[in-house]
Amino acid sequence: MNTTRGPDYEDLGTLERGDGQVRLIFTRRLAHPPGKVWRALTEAEHLAAWFPTTVEGDLAAGATLRFAFRDLALPTFGGTMVACMPPRLLEFVWGDETLRFELTADGAATVLSFSASFAELGRAARDAAGWHTCLDLLGYEVAGEHAPWQQDDRWRAVHGEYVRAFGPAAATIGPPAEWEDTYGPA
């Protein structure tokens, strides 16, 4: 497996490629216990602050899930809950991606390991910037604070870092037209 890590951004995600799959990996240390982080990962009022879609469905392995974007005019789509073991593991299929959240207690804090797996290398920089921004927002949500920046501005700032870190082959697919219609050109 080939791994690329960004050199200039402390919490930049990692890109792994192999077996026809691309996997983005992020690690964040949150100064809150796993139970509080778990609630931010699973409860609708917290998800609204950081996750790009609503999530409808049961927190049980095998459950059918439904996702709808809040701010973009994109169609709803489905998924499946793969694993749900509170408060340490949440894994589900989100459209054509598999998202995995692992929580490990670290004293009074939590280490969050997040990965997003999909097939198209060309969207890796775009998706990495998106997940990076979402995880930043998650950190603010868990801390009970508001981000000091706009989500689209943050995406633009970190997207350039991911393009440099992952290379041009990982940046051939940009944001959907609906994103640009809402937030302006990438």
Image: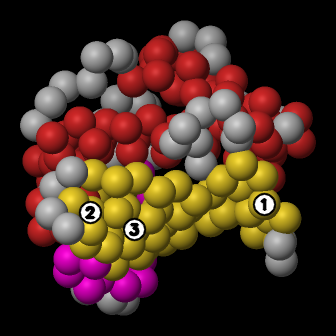
Question: What amino acid type should be assigned to the residue bearing mark 3?
Answer: Phe
Closer to the camera in the image, 13 or 66: 13
Earlier in the chain: of badge 3 and badge 1, it is 1
Residue to which mark 3 is pinned: 101
Residue 138: x and y in percent read 29, 44
Q: CA distance from mark 2 to mark 3?
A: 12 Å
In the image, taking residue 163 as reference, residue 13 lies left or right, namely left
Q: Is residue 68 above or below residue 182?
A: below
Dot 3: element: strand
Residue to which mark 2 is pinned: 110
Question: What amino acid type should be assigned to the residue bearing mark 2?
Answer: Thr
Quarter location, residue 75 = top left
Q: Residues within 10 Å of mark 3 (few under 14, many from 20)?
A: many
Residue 129: x and y in percent read 57, 36
In the image, taking residue 143 as reference, residue 90 lies left or right, namely right
Residue 76 appearing in the image: yes
Question: What amino acid type should be assigned to the residue bearing mark 1?
Answer: Thr
Closer to the camera in the image, 32 or 183: 32
Q: Residue furthest top?
A: 184
CB within 8 Å, label 2 to label 3: no
Dot 2: element: strand
Closer to the camera in the image, 56 or 92: 92
Residue 112: x and y in percent read 37, 62
Residue to which mark 1 is pinned: 3
Dot 1: element: strand
